[in-house]
Image: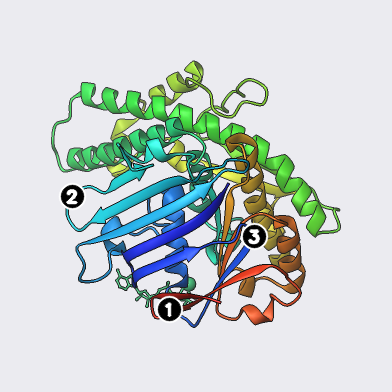
Amino acid sequence: MYAVSLSLENYRNLPDASLTLSPGINVLWGDNAQGKSNILEGLYYFARGRSFRGVPDRLLIRTGCEFASLRLSCRREGDTHDTELGAVIPQHGRKRLTRGGAPLSGMREMVGAFRAVLFCPEHLTLISGSPALRRSFLDIAAAQLSPQYVAALSVYTRALAERNALLRQAAEGENVGSDQWEVYAEQLARSGAYLAQVRSAYVRRLEGHVASCFADMTDGREKPTLRYQCTAQTPQDPQEGELFTPAPDEALRASMAAALTSDIPREIRAGTTLFGVHRDDLTIELNGEAAKLYASQGQTRSLALAMKLAEGAISRDIGGGEPVYLLDDVFSELDAARREYLLSALGDRQVVITSCEPETWISGVSGVAWFRVRNGTVETR
Ligand SMILES: Nc1ncnc2c1ncn2[C@@H]1O[C@H](COP(=O)(O)OP(=O)(O)OP(=O)(O)O)[C@@H](O)[C@H]1O
Ligand SMILES: [Mg+2]
């Protein structure tokens, strides 16, 4: 799969930008604060249905404008026609998503139309950073492959926020009936069991890819192991080779539901839900030791890079066809050996790279399409 062309209208600082992309390496270059990451963010919007910078949609609209409009043509390898995707984000009201001109009811219907792996400097701390970063890694990767995962995540997130609000109300003395706690326990257990099961199966798949990329980058003496660490019982593996189970494991669901009603007074005192997949983690070990504590700076970077490449491999295997790789400012953060490895690992896939100083790393790479980004405009060179 690759992006053929992208148009952004009144998106961030870009009044009207259009790019026709090469199926190989594309470099967006220019000074700081010109709009390079904004373009990447606009492209990634179609993979995730929101900004990768964690901001609400309305901040994506160019200051002073009524709406932002994004259009993407993408194509699957071997296809003879493009898929046209559109998003209109208004100041007020709901965003409108379209595929081939037809309206979609939400992001779930767009899942899989465009898949991308984003790699930005923040991901270099995937190993050493907080568990939230690793959960988000898993959620973003799995959500691009399954509308059912998107749905479960949205049920879980909403139910968790509502239950936390209820816990705070109860702390202030409001009377909350046991039936209300049971409704939330059921919603969180059902969606949570599904999420845990998919995440766990995803991590199992991830491990082999991470180990082989890591071995390629290092002398191969230390072997990474990856585990999904679930606060409930360990999820059962789905059928051999399967990633997305049709229904959650019943035992897991039941144990999660029981935990969510087991000590509500403690949760009221804490003012937050103490149990569930929002507290799970992905643990990474090197030779049996927690990589977070044991690995060198260089090894944690190599592991992070390996995880991103592994995400791409799983996207290809499950989604059918390579995803697009978006690298925001990562080259300036990597040393020459890792840059070289990354470029060779990405081979002839479509890559879109932002950089202030491409000349420091691009020499020797052929077939690059250049886009000069200056003050919200794009020129092809
Ligand atoms: N909604 C908006 N309306 C207008 N301008 C915006 C909006 N949101 C962000 N900007 C501006 O867009 C500019 C470009 O941001 P962007 O992150 O794309 O820069 P960049 O070229 O990637 O720079 P760097 O090399 O520093 O990463 C910023 O100066 C920012 O203030
Ligand atoms: Mg940037």
Observer-nearest residue: 380 or 112? 380
Measured in 3D between alpha carbons, the distance from the residue under mark 1 to the one under mark 2, in whole angstroms, is 29 Å
Distance from the alpha carbon under mark 2 to that under mark 3: 38 Å
Q: Is residue 170 left or right of residue 368?
A: left
Q: Earlier in the sequence, mark 3 or mark 1?
A: 3
Q: Looking at the picture, which amino acid does disc 1 mark?
A: Gln
The extreme front residue here reads 80
Instruction: Decide if ligand 1 comes within 8 Å of the CB at mark 2.
Output: no
- Single out the mark in the foreground, 3 or 1: 3
Rendered residue at 19%/63% (across/down): 66
Tell me the crowding category of disc 3: few under 14, some 14 to 19, or many 20 or more residues within 10 angstroms, Cα based: some
Decide if residue 288 is in sight here: no
x then y, percent, for residue 139: 49, 43
* N-term-proximal mark, 2 vs 3: 3
Amino acid beneath label 2: Gly
Q: Nearer the viewer, residue 94 or 364?
A: 364
Position of residue 51 measured from the top left corner of the image (x, y, whole percent): 39, 57
Q: Position of residue 15 (x, y in %)?
A: 32, 71
C-alpha span from label 3 to label 1:
23 Å
Please give the label number shown on residue 323. Answer: none
Looking at the image, the residue that sits furthest to the top is: 250
Drawn side of residue 9 relative to residue 47, left or right = left
Residue at 54% across / 46% down in the picture? 75
Residue underneath mark 2: 93
From the image, tell me which residue sits under label 3: 24
Q: Determine which residue is flagged by label 1.
A: 34
Label 1 vs 2, first from the N-terminus: 1
Instruction: Respond yes or no on whether mark 1 lies under 8 Å from ligand 1.
Output: yes
Q: Residue at x 60, y 32 (%)?
A: 201
What SS does tag 1 mark? loop
Within 10 angstroms of label 2, few (less than 14), some, or many (20 or more) residues? few
